Image: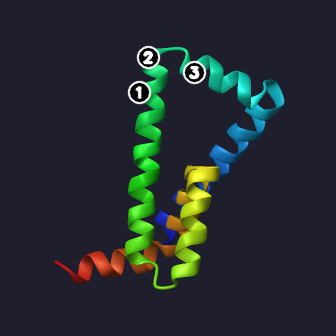
Amino acid sequence: MMQLRILFLVLAAALLATILWALGTSSVHDGFAHVTAEPWGLVTFADLYLGFLVAAIVIAATEDRRVLALLLIVGVFMLGNLVTASWLAWRAPRLLARLRARD
């Protein structure tokens, strides 16, 4: 279990490092304009936001505290999978226990 939590934290840290690197090399607006100029860029964004929506549904379905769930969901749509990976690292034991209990 600890290995899974560490994996999610490492992935979140790697994503954060990549975000900080990108922020230092170009503007966010220019990056979005470049990506959305291409059809496959739009597909990539559609895929990304579908993933955000799926993560939001899982968070809403599994978090007992509604206010926390709402804050996390807003965070996912604002900060992306940095929030998702961090949340999974935090909640992995509980989520896996719930999944195993349903088998």
In terms of sequence position, does the residue under pointer 1 or pointer 3 come before the other? Answer: 3
Which residue is depicted at the point 55% across and 21% down? 36
Left or right: 21 as drawn, with respect to 47: right
x, y (%) of residue 19?
A: 70, 39
**Which disc number belongs to residue 43?**
1
Left or right: 77 as drawn, with respect to 45: right
**Label 3 sits on what residue type?**
Val
Image quarter of the C terminus: bottom left
SS at mark 2 in the image: helix
Gap between marks 1 and 3 measured at Cα? 10 Å
**Which disc number belongs to residue 39?**
2
- Please rate how many residues cluster around mark 1, counting C-alpha atoms within 10 Å: few if below 14, some from 14 to 19, many from 20: few
Q: Which residue is mark 3?
A: 35
Above or below residue 34? Residue 100 is below
**Residue sitting nearer the eye, 59 or 14:** 59
Which residue is depicted at the point 47% across and 51% down? 52
